[in-house]
Image (cartoon, helix red, strand yellow):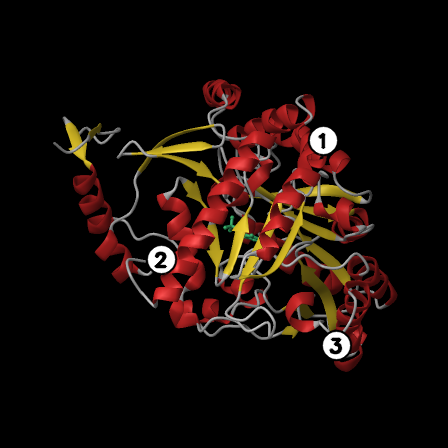
Amino acid sequence: MPRLTPSCRTGRPGNRSTADWQAADNGHYLHPFSDYKELHAEGARIQVRAEGIYMWDTQGNRIIDGLAGLGCVNIGYGRQELARVAAEQMSQLSFCQSFFRTSNQPAIELAEQLTQLAPAGLTHVFYASSGSEANETCFKLARRYWQLAGRPQKKIVIARANAYHGSTIATSSLSGLPDLYDSGGDMPIAGIARIGAPYWYLEGADLSPEEFGMRAAGWLEARILDLGADNVAAFFAEPIQGAGGAIIPPATYWPEIQRICTKYEVLLSVDEVVCGFGRTGHWFGSHRFGIQQPDLMAVAKGITSAYIPLSAALVSNRVAAVLIDRGGEFYHGFTHSGHPVACAVALENIRILREERIVEHVAAIEPHFAARVAALADHPLVGDVRSCGLFAGIQLVADKRARQMFDSSIRAGDRCSREALARGLALRSIGDTMALMPPLVITEEEIDTVFDITREALDATARQLERGTHGPR
Ligand SMILES: Cc1ncc(COP(=O)(O)O)c(C=O)c1O
């Protein structure tokens, strides 16, 4: 007898089996970042409920969310306070446009709080709904700033290999993941230059991490000199590169990047979409890595713990002052910019992060998490392990000594994440790097369970590969 789950709000009567849900999903829903042929052959897992760090699907499976959704459910699932605040705000003021000399109280209060929490000098906030839109806003703001400042030739934006800044045309172009360029349009667009990522394991084995951090930062200086500082508007980068492979830079990297940006008057635009709101044991990755004076900063995801979409571009006083003093319409924005319900939910999320000292919890639990990550280094499939706060990358390799990767057709990472899921853990594979970023409220005991399952999944993957089975992936 198949397990049945109730229909939601479609008005469709009665209960539906998982197969029925999957057929309807295949019939009508084009998922993001999906191979439709593969998805249609397998069918999606249909998730129905979540609480804390746990999720349940239509088949009654309980799964630990080792991804915090997509690195966004920072305070965990199911907090009623956020639902209450959203309902109250919807009853009082469900929407408010911000285009025509109109504002709203949650948006104003949130802007005050964000600028207090962020690194000094970020004094203004431009709202959007997604990380892509926040980065797109930073991109336009950087060029707009130099236009208004009387230096319109300062237009080129430098970004890194393995970067992920979003999936709009401009932010895909900023990203250093060539697969994104195949998704349509002539990408990357003009006016973007690229440097390498601070990926010590693959690029810097001949140096200590600290020496390599300086070398990798030097690539920015060389590129600026090559292009001419007068032509470069900004440098875009994530404190930790997430979707590009959980790449954690050496400690020397960011202070040197900051020095270079300041020296050549290149705006520093930091993408805190994943690192923001506690992931690294600090409010922002910028605090963790010593990024003292970003000019622009994109935040999203953890700003509401993904209870509702919201993002923002935080803007330095230097940039905002020019926009305000020079005037002229900034012809950019979104219907939902400063949405009162999203901003009210963000305020409640920040209250919970503060009052429950969740960022401090991440810092306190980090040594335990890091030790469990490090312990995986002895596994025959694991070439490198790295972690920062509650963010880890476990790199699978075909040959540990030679640091040789698997052929991509083997899909070792994908196999490992499927083995983990079969054992009740959602673990993301980024190529052959396994990424872990659980909700920030995870306990030490739960961390132990996560790593016990991860090791079992690695063992099972190794067995699959030894047998040469390309069995059910
Ligand atoms: C660092 C980073 N920037 C930007 C984005 C894009 O955010 P969104 O998917 O909300 O557009 C992501 C998404 O994962 C991200 O990880």
Q: Position of residue 29 (x, y in %)?
A: 27, 49
- Tell me the amino acid under the disc marked 3: Arg
Mark 1: amino acid: Glu
Label at residue 315:
none
Q: Position of residue 267 (x, y in %)?
A: 76, 60
Residue shown at the point (40%, 39%) measured from the top left: 424
**Measured Cα–Cα span from mark 1 to mark 2:** 36 Å
Closer to the chain start, of discs 1 and 2, is 2
Residue beneath the point at 47% across and 66% down: 180
Q: Nearer the viewer, mark 1 or mark 2?
A: 1
Q: Which residue is mark 3?
A: 223
**How many numbered circles does the render carry?**
3
Q: Can residue 46 be seen from the camera position used here? A: yes
Q: Quadrant of the N terminus?
A: top left
Residue located at (72% from left, 64% from top): 234
Q: Quadrant of residue 404?
A: bottom right
Vertical placement of residue 223 versus 103, above or below: below
Mark seen at residue 34:
2
**Location of residue 414 with respect to 274 vertically, above or below:** below
CA neighbours of label 2 inside 10 A, class few (<14), some (14 to 19), many (20+): few
Q: Amino acid at mark 2?
A: Ser
Q: Nearer the viewer, residue 198 or 418?
A: 418
Label 1: how many Cα within 10 Å (few below 14, some 14–19, many 20+): some
Q: Which residue is mark 1?
A: 360
